Amino acid sequence: MSGGRAGALDGDLRLLVCDLDGTLLEADGSISDRTRSALGGVRAAGIRVVVATGRIPKGILSLVRELDLDGPQITMHGALVTAPTNGETVFASTLGPEQVDELLALAAEIDLPVLLCYPGGFRTNDLRQEVVDLFVPFNEPLPELVEDLAALRASRPNKIAIWTGKERYQAALDAARRRLGDRYTITSGDNRSIELLPRGVDKGRAAGELARWMGLSLEQVGAIGDGTNDIELLSAAHRSVAMRHARPEVQAAADLVVPDGVPDDAASAIAVLFDGRQPFGKGATS
């Protein structure tokens, strides 16, 4: 869909929630002219655009300003729905002291670096180079090194992340699921870390909270995404599109998938979302 095809847009949708890394952004962190044009067409049709990301608010501030996105955005995998420009907050969820204790014990058990994540930054007990490398592409501040994270048990982080690297990701994920069961949301934005939030907190829940704040329902929400942390968002939205490069379980959560023969980018996903081509995803067997 080009920026001039506002007439093709689905009249029922009033909010478009877009994953950031791997969806709106190119591999180098830029936004293509195609995607800018597609977003312009959506906004010209009176549909609000927001981003949904695992980043903290500060990590998307420059992008929000660049795209002139006003109001609250979905950050920290849905644990915080807030406006990076002025702090206006719609929804916030934090981890209590006993939850922090349990998650720090999990990190110690699997012997991997752990990060406590707050709206303004991060605290960690291990600032090895691989941990530093997690932050370089995302315009986020490097974590503060803290010798005893247990001393911060009552500091109410929004989420806790455990760095795994790609090689240990699946084993760490399996260990977290065995130990924690369904008491937490366990997700990942890059399959190099597992991220732990209060139970029931995810991008899908956050999209619902934002929609209600806007006077809308999820029946008026469209979504595009590509990551494990987008599954609940794609499932919750009235209409959703997964990127072609997304993992199979992510594609299965969506109504549609960016088809072969077109660029695997946000502009194509928006075109598919509003033109309704190639119906498979939720409940499909293909």
Image (spheres, helix red, strand yellow):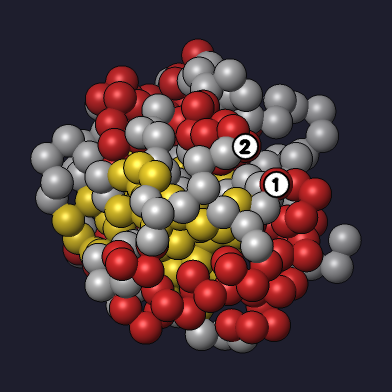
Quadrant of the image occupied by residue 56 = top left
Residue at (51, 85) in percent of width and height:
183
Q: Position of residue 42 (x, y in %)?
A: 39, 34
Helix, strand or loop at label 1? It is helix
Residue topped by disc 2 = 130
Residue 165's mark? 1
Between 19 and 213, the one lying in front of the other is 19
Instruction: Characterize the local packing of mark 1: few (<14), some (14-19) or many (20 or more) Cα atoms within 10 angstroms.
Output: some
Q: Is residue 76 visible?
A: no
Compared across the picture, whether 120 is left or right of 165 comes to: left
Helix, strand or loop at label 2? It is helix
Residue type at the position of mark 1: Gly
Residue at (59, 82) in percent of width and height:
180
Q: Position of residue 145 (x, y in %)?
A: 39, 45
Tag 2 or tag 1, which sits nearer the N-term? 2
Instruction: Characterize the local packing of mark 2: few (<14), some (14-19) or many (20 or more) Cα atoms within 10 angstroms.
Output: some
Q: Are marks 1 and 2 in contact (CB under 8 Å)?
A: yes
Name of the residue lying farthest toward the front: 147
Q: Position of residue 190 (x, y in %)?
A: 63, 46
Between 79 and 232, the one lying in front of the other is 79
